[in-house]
Amino acid sequence: MKLDAALPPISLVEVPATAAAAEALGFDCLWTTETQHDPFLPHALIAEHTNRLKMGTGIAVSFARSPAVLAYTAWDLAAQSQGRFILGLGTQVKAHIERRFGLEWPDSVTGKLREQIQVIRALWQTWQMGAPLNQRGDYYKITLMSPFFNPGPLPPFPARSGAEQGRVPIYIAGVNTGLAKLAGELCDGFLVHPFHTPRYLKEVLHPAIRAGLEKESRAWGDVVVSASVFAATNRAEREACRQQVSFYASTPSYRAVMELHGWGDAAEKLSALAARGQWDEMPGLVSDEILAEFVTEASSPTELAATLKIRYSTLADRLTLYLPFTPGERDAWWQELLAAFNA
């Protein structure tokens, strides 16, 4: 199991030092998010200022972009990083696609994301192998690639990257079974949303991934399970997790996680509070019982490392704490955690 870091929402000028510090401490991968900044731009700097560290978008909003744009950007970053880049995609939710990006929400979420991935891979095959480009579906018709617009094949990757030549790994994120199954069918990895419990991961998401794998005659090891996890080693962190859990639990499309545990009523109440903008009242509906299912708690970084490894030993291949990594803040805490986790 690998321990990764999340890049905080910082300016580009701060990225080189943050990436170098993450590599020096021993993180395996540095993930960017699409919240306050573009998720791709930092990776040019991460690649330039590190040698070993893997890097990925966790996530870039796929429905806000053309698959051709995604293909070009990932191709360039894979080349610059010498095979260390991972293209992590997420669909976002309907309100954000329509009201934040001003685009249409698709009739089929899995259908459109499947086609996006197929188009991206088809473009890569054309650039790497010279394969004919003729990708047609319900959402995209991609048939044109003249030499002037063809970037050509990726350069050879060094063996230390562990990357397959000419291939950029694609991970997708999700909360519900449709996208988990799609990951099993088509992707190299599945990014588990922080709003999950180990039981939900074991009883709901794992079976969905396996169903996708079986459909395409793939093996379990063909998909990397990378989970973002809530963790706390003090009261302040615990209460911050409670607030974040209450926010995610209010999202109607995430309701299945709460319902698995019999907390559907609490989720409905949280949705009602969110609709009225009563954010401060929401954490009060997340009981200690609920919190314990979502948050890994420990009294020290060493204990946290051991607890995480036990809790997720059969559930995930990669973990990223829901705590953005910032050099100069809690450096000793991170050092202790990584030393214990990697021991």
Image (cartoon, rainbow, N blue to C red):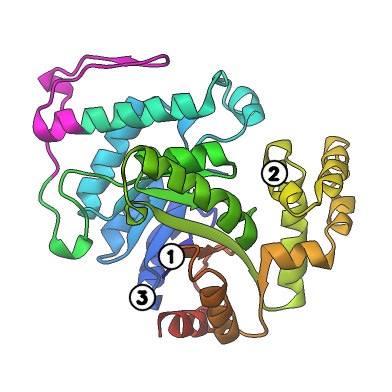
Residue 103, picture quadrant = top right
Lower sequence index among marks 3 and 1? 1
**Compared to 337, does 49 lie above or below?**
above
Q: Callout 1, which amino acid?
A: Thr
Circle nearer the viewer, 2 or 3: 2
Identify the element where label 2 is drawn: helix
Q: Which range of residues does the magenta coloring cover?
A: 125-154
Say if 220 sits above or below 118 in the image: below
Q: Work out how far the residue at label 1 is from the one at label 2, CA to CA, in angstroms.
A: 36 Å
The three-letter amino acid code for the residue at tag 2 is Ala
Q: How many angstroms separate mark 3 from mark 1 (CA)?
A: 10 Å
Residues at discs 1 and 2 in contact (Cβ within 8 Å): no
Q: For mark 3, what is the residue?
A: 24
User: Which is nearer the N-term, disc 1 or disc 2?
Assistant: 1
Residue pictured at 58% horizontal, 27% vertical? 97
Residue at image location 32% in from the left, 51% down from the top: 219
Which residue is identified by label 1?
18
Separation (CA) of disc 2 from disc 3: 39 Å
Question: Looking at the picture, how far across and down is residue 269, in whole percent?
Answer: 88, 44
Left or right? Give the position of 76 relative to 171.
Answer: left
Q: Depth check: give the residue in front, 270 or 223.
A: 223
164 left or right of 177?
left
- Foreground disc of the pair 3, 1: 3
Q: Secondary structure at mark 3?
A: helix
In front: label 1 or label 2: 2
In the image, residue 135 lies in the stretch drawn in magenta: yes
User: Horizontal and vertical percent for residue 73?
Assistant: 31, 37
Q: Circle 2 is placed at which residue position?
A: 256
Whether residue 290 is visible to the viewer of this picture, yes or no, is: yes
